[in-house]
Amino acid sequence: MALGDEHRIADWFILHFTENPGMAFGLEFGGLWGKMALSIFRIITVGFIFYWLRNLVKRKAKPVATTAVALIFAGAFGNIIDSAFYGLIFDSGTIRDTEVNAWLRYAGISEANFEGYAGFLQGCVVDMLYFPLYKGYLPEWLPIWGGDYFVFFRPVFNLADTSISVGVGLLILFQKAVFGEDKKRGKYSE
């Protein structure tokens, strides 16, 4: 698929190919240095999540706790792998132009030539899942956004993002089951 290509599965489900040089929802900071800082932060965070997961398994924690943390770990690790190697494998991709201080898109279809277009940890993360569940104009009476065209859910994301979101959602929904025992004993899960 070329950048921006779409395959409509249903009215509310579209495979949309995009490259995300930043973090969730395409947010970014600091250009290439920001991307490197974000990558290092992700690696350190995944190390802590792995440590937490390992301790949950050793303690035979409740399955919901182990599952939630495993989902968060898998998603975060998947995004690191994508960022680390995507730029090394393909011949073209979204790159940072320091002269104009912006990310530049490319035309055509990238090919896997293993020569790369970016260095280690400088590649983009591929996002492809798009669920525009509602499209339309907001009611005029609504403050600030009244009458504006609105799409819910606009962000394009990937399976790794989904894994992280489901894991965090499980921790929130089952926080008493996950953290309750340790709180009673006077400590939190490691």
Image (tube, rainbow, N blue to C red):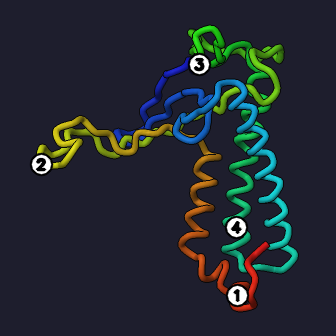
Q: Which residue lies under the disc numbered 1?
A: 181
As measured in the structure, the alpha-carbon distance from the residue carrying label 4 to the one carrying label 2 is 44 Å
Q: Are marks 1 and 2 in contact (CB under 8 Å)?
A: no
Name the foreground residue: 1 vs 77.
77
Q: Amino acid at mark 3?
A: Trp
Measured along the vertical axis of the image, is residue 118 above or below residue 78? above
Callout in the foreground (1, 4): 1
Residue name at image x 57 percent, y 41 percent: 24
| Residue at the spot of label 2 | 141
Spatial separation of the CA atoms under disc 1 and disc 2: 48 Å
Sort mark 2 into few (<14), some (14-19) or many (20+) by Cα contacts within 10 Å.
few
Residue beneath label 4, please?
67
Residue 63: x and y in percent read 71, 76
First reached walking from the N terminus: tag 4 or tag 2: 4
Above/below status of 140 relative to 64:
above
Question: x, y (%) of residue 96?
Answer: 65, 17
Q: Which residue is mark 3?
A: 103
